[in-house]
Image (cartoon, rainbow, N blue to C red):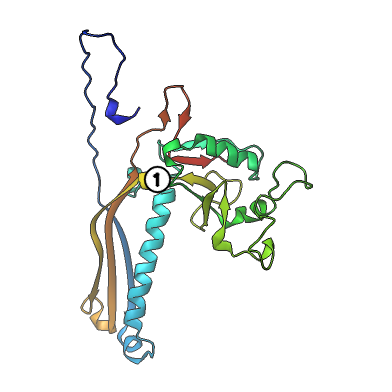
Amino acid sequence: PYFGGITAAWQPEASSIGETEPAFRQSEWTAWDLVLYTVSSNQLLADNGIGLDALLTQLFSQAMTWYTEYAFLRGLGAGSSMPMGIINAPASYVQSRSAANTFKLADAAAMMSRLHVRSWDSACWIMHQSVMPQLIQMYAASSSSDALVWMTPFGDGKQGPAAMKLPKAFLNGLPIYFTEKLPTLGTKGDVMLVDLSHYLIGKRMETQIDVSPHLLFRTNQLAWRVVLRLDGRPWLNSYITDAAGWVSSPFVVLNAG
C-alpha cells in the first residue's frame, strides 16, 4: 500500500524487468463556510470601558477556532457542509472496547497495535476529560495491587507522583491532550490515538470580519459578520493493510461500549 503503488521484485540475471507505475488520485476540496453573526448597540461600544470592539474581535477568533477544531475531530463531511472529522473518516480504524463505559490498559495496548508504525514518532492521544478518572486509576493489570499506570512511582523527585503537573501526561510514551470537543466516556471517539500530520487542512481564505452600520441603522446598532472558508479531511481514503495482512492506520478511534 506504500509508495504510490510502485512494486519491486527479485529476479535472475539478464531477465526482462517488469514495469510498474505509481498510481495517483485527484482530490476535490470544497471551501465550506463557517459563519458567525452578532449585533451590538452603538451605545454599548461607545460607553464600555474595556474596548469592546477589540474584545469582540478576540472572541470571534476564539469561537471560529473552537468550531474548526470540533469539525476536524467530529465533522460529518460533505453531507453536512463541513469538514470530515477523524471520528467519522473512512481512514480511521475503529478499535473495539474491552468493557462498556471503561478505558483500560488493554484498550490502550490494542489501539497502539493498530497505530501505523510510521506514525509512532508523531502520534498523540486525544481524550475527553471524562476519561480522566479511569486513566488516573488505571492499573498495569486488573488488580489494585499492581502499579498505577498514570503516576510514575518517582514523581518529579520532590513532591511525589500525585503532585505532577497535568501537562506532563503521557500514556505508552505518547502525550495526552484532553478536550471537550470529543464525546464523553463510553461513546465512540472518547479516546483517539492519532497522527495529525496525516490530516490535511485547506484554507480558501483567512478569517474575514465585516462590520456594517447600515443594516440596523434605525435601531442604532452595528452588525458583525465573520466568515471562514476551509475544508479538512484525513490524507488517506482508507486504513492500511500491510504485506502480512495486518490492518493499521494513522487514526485509531475507540468504539462505543
Q: Where is residue 51 in the image (x, y as percent from the top left)?
A: 35, 86
Image point (47%, 29%), residue name: 247
The quadrant of the rendering that contains the N terminus is: top left
Residue in the foreground of this view, choosing between 110 and 31: 110
Q: In this view of the protein, can residue 257 be seen by the observer?
A: no
Instruction: Pick the residue in front: 173 or 209.
Output: 173
Where disc 1 sits, the SS reads loop
Q: Is residue 202 above or below residue 7?
A: below
Q: Position of residue 17 (x, y in %)?
A: 21, 13
Give above or below for 243 relative to 173: above
Relative image position of residue 210 (x, y in whole percent):
23, 71
Name the residue at 79% across, 47% down: 145
Number of marks in picture: 1
The quarter holding residue 234 reads top left
- Residue 157's place in the image compared with 9, above or below, is below
Q: Name the residue under label 1.
A: 76
Residue type indicated by callout 1: Leu
Q: Residue furthest front?
A: 13
Specify the quadrant of the image occupied by residue 53: bottom left
Relative horizontal placement of residue 109, taking residue 64 as reference (left or right)? right
Q: In which quarter of the image is residue 211?
A: bottom left
Look at the picture and state if 5 lies above or below 108. above
**Residue at coordinates 22% horizontally, 35% vertically from top-left?**
26
Q: Which residue is depicted at the point 58% across and 62% down?
A: 166
Q: Of 32 and 176, which appears nearest the observer?
A: 176
